[in-house]
Image: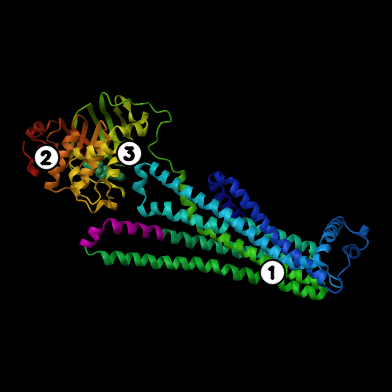
Amino acid sequence: MRDFKMQDLAKVLRFGWPYLRRYLGRFASGVMLAVLFGLTNAILLWAINTILIRMSPEAPASITQSAGATHTLGRVEQWKADLQKGSEAVVDQWLPRAGRQADWRQIVGGLLLFPLLAALRGFVGYGSSYCLAWVSERVVNDLRVEVLRKLSSLSLDYFNKATTGDLITRVNGDTAMLQRCLNGGLSDLIKEPVTVIGLVAMLFAIDWKLTLMVLVFFPLVIVPIVVLGKKVRRSAKAGLNTTITQASLIVEVLSGIRVVKAFNLEEQQVERFQRMSKDLVAHSMRTTRAKEITNPIIESIGTLGFGLLVVVIVLRQVKIEDMVTLLTGVAFIYTPIKKLAGVHNLIQQTHSGIDRLMQVLREKPSVEETPHPVRLSGFQSGLALDRVGFSYGHETVLADVSIELPRGTKLGIAGESGSGKSTLVNLLFRFYDPTSGAIRIDGKDLRELSLHDLRERMALVSQEVVLFDMTVAENIGCGRPGATRAEIEAAAKAAFAHDFIQRLPEGYDTRVAERGLNLSGGQRQRLAIARAFVRNAPILVLDEATAALDAQSEAEVQVAIERLEENRTVICVAHRLSTLRNMDRIIVLSAGRIVEDGTFTGLVQSGGRFADMARRQGVGI
Ligand code: ADP
């Protein structure tokens, strides 16, 4: 059972080590101070014993007298006697003794011994806690950044599987939990074992038989510590699961607030939240009960030893000063043991969170970059899909899709919903890799290129406009890092966004509130187009860019899009066929296959699926 705990500890330490290593100096100082702190506890016990011996009426004039005939002693006792003799010579000068006139040194010594020891213990403890907290704050902070970096490096399939609440909890909740564990536990984890060892050593020096007798009871406290620790782990895990679901619920409600309101779902959602909160309270209380019952149990079992000690002391007529020291020492030992049990509980509580963090950090993107990517210079000849097949799982989503797209071609992709249009776009950006076949850019397989190189050549304008909580200028400028203000304004002008941006309260420096609620759909889309202008990428992918807009906004945005399309290779996915009118070539997908291929006019005239869709939408030639 003990192994179990050590394993957990080893796991946490192994996991934290690469992060800890960066702050090794401060960490080592913290550890050293913590060890010193542990030792001061033993020194305090020594001081109590020494003072008691010196204050008792039959205080020996010197340790040499009490040591008696030293040649009859065993080796350990001999060593002990020598040590005592050496220290006694120094101590005797500085501490008062019963039955002796005290000089100034002894008065000062008596006055300051305990205050000095207490101050030493206090400040050393402070220093250790400070250094270790300094390190753990930084470690957790680094880790939080690392988790987000890792998450953003993962491929889209990972995000399809995970809920938003789960991801947010990994970055924030799990790391915060670890922070609590390190802040509260790391320092105790070093201080307290040293304290226990120091105290036990002192007690052994005073009376090893009695000490051994008392210690027999201590292994017994390990059983409740382990059992309760498991309980803490289980309830903490259940609590964590509820927290994750709750976080997802918050994201759902807030991001879908329009629908929530429109369907009068506020109360229903709040009730769901409330139910989870109740569960959370129950889990928390279960954790608290298991944690808090640990100390009373330790005390009850541990004090059995204390009781036995009292009886034996009386029966054996132990000297009063040793008796007081023994009793004080044993009483002292409870605190570190209780603290260690607390650390154990804390580790159990953090266990699931740490597991989850380790899981994320071990995760590998399914779309991996080759270690030695081929460099791409510009975009020369064109794009080609060569018998591309794809599946997200079992079902085939794309099959045998082949297209040659010379540079400068404008390709429209039409098809019913679910026919695989967005999937094709996902493959072009290498969000996923084809299951069979290959996509080539200038004759090079996308898998041979660096992701950065590939995506630098592409710009995406999709139905869903993502604006960050930054200024308008920054939102446009993020299309290409390093874009100047002049370039940003030129892009905004080209996207017909300049005028409305200037009318915003602070023009280009207006912060776009999260989700850009203060901008209309058309305005948001024109910002996205400006971003694509700044990017100035040779390949432009439009994924239902105007699908969410009303007719008026669509017309405005369409003009901007047409300007953006000039001199670029365009791939335009559209459900609304009128937007495909100026494409050079259109393919029609059905159940993942190309079923028609031609020009807009040609397809309408051919009377196939495209013509059908066009007729239903009232689109003529
Ligand atoms: P379209 O864009 O033409 O509406 P999609 O490319 O989005 O079509 O979807 C094609 C098929 O792939 C659909 O059957 C859809 O259910 C499935 N699909 C889309 N995305 C995923 C995904 N992330 N995981 C599993 N199946 C998916």
Q: Is residue 545 above or below residue 230?
A: above
Is 358 on the left-hand or right-hand side of 461? Answer: right
Q: Are marks 2 and 1 in contact (CB under 8 Å)?
A: no
**Ligand 1 is located in which of the four quadrants?**
top left
Amino acid carrying mark 2 in the image: Ser
Categorize mark 2 by other alpha carbons within 10 Å: few (<14), some (14-19), many (20+): some
Range drawn in magenta: 242-262
Q: Are marks 3 and 1 in contact (CB under 8 Å)?
A: no
Q: Can residue 517 be found in the magenta stretch? A: no
- Element under label 1? helix
- Element under label 3? loop
Residue holding disc 1: 331
Q: Nearer the viewer, residue 378 or 414?
A: 378
Amino acid carrying mark 3 in the image: Phe
Mark 3 vs mark 1, foreground winner is 1
| Alpha-carbon span between mark 2 and mark 3 | 28 Å
Q: Position of residue 569 (x, y in %)?
A: 22, 30
Quadrant showing the C terminus? top left
